[in-house]
Image: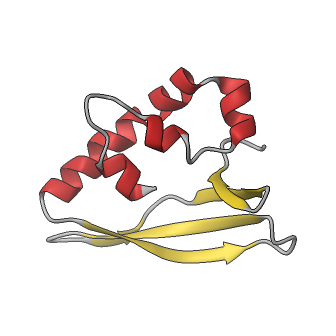
Amino acid sequence: FIEALINVKENKMDAVVELVNPENTKNLGEQLIAATFTPAVAMVQLADKFGGKFRAGKITVGEDGNTAVQIPYFSGPTENWDLDPVHWVKVEGDWYLRLGKN
């Protein structure tokens, strides 16, 4: 996911949108999902440019085995911290970002 954000060029968010739960994409549309991640792209690319590193961090899989919460970890030149949780859902055997309560 972070690599997809780092690699966005000229606002082409296809690789990011592909990581989102297909049901979210169907309900919200690709343009709204792309717009949702635009601020994250700027932040992640700037951090990467100045030597920041992102790691998967802690991942907790739900009891049902079809949901997970990831707490990514960021290490920068002067600070290190856990980032906001990222929610995942397994759909037909593949993991996708889960937006909202879907």
Q: Residue at x 20, y 49 (%)?
A: 46
- Is residue 6 found left or right of 77 in the rendered image? right
- Is residue 19 found left or right of 51 in the rendered image? right
Q: Is residue 22 above or below residue 67?
A: above
| Image quadrant containing the C terminus | top right
Q: Residue at x 23, y 71 (%)?
A: 79
Image quadrant where residue 73 sits: bottom left
Of 18 and 36, which appears nearest the observer? 18
Q: Position of residue 2 (x, y in %)?
A: 39, 57
Task: Please state the total of marks drawn on the protein image.
Answer: 0
Q: Position of residue 5 (x, y in %)?
A: 37, 47
Image quadrant where residue 76 sits: bottom left
Q: Position of residue 40 (x, y in %)?
A: 38, 43
Q: Is residue 80 above or below residue 30?
A: below
Q: Is residue 2 above or below residue 33?
A: below
What colouring method underlies this structural image?
A: secondary structure
Q: Residue at x 12, y 59 (%)?
A: 50
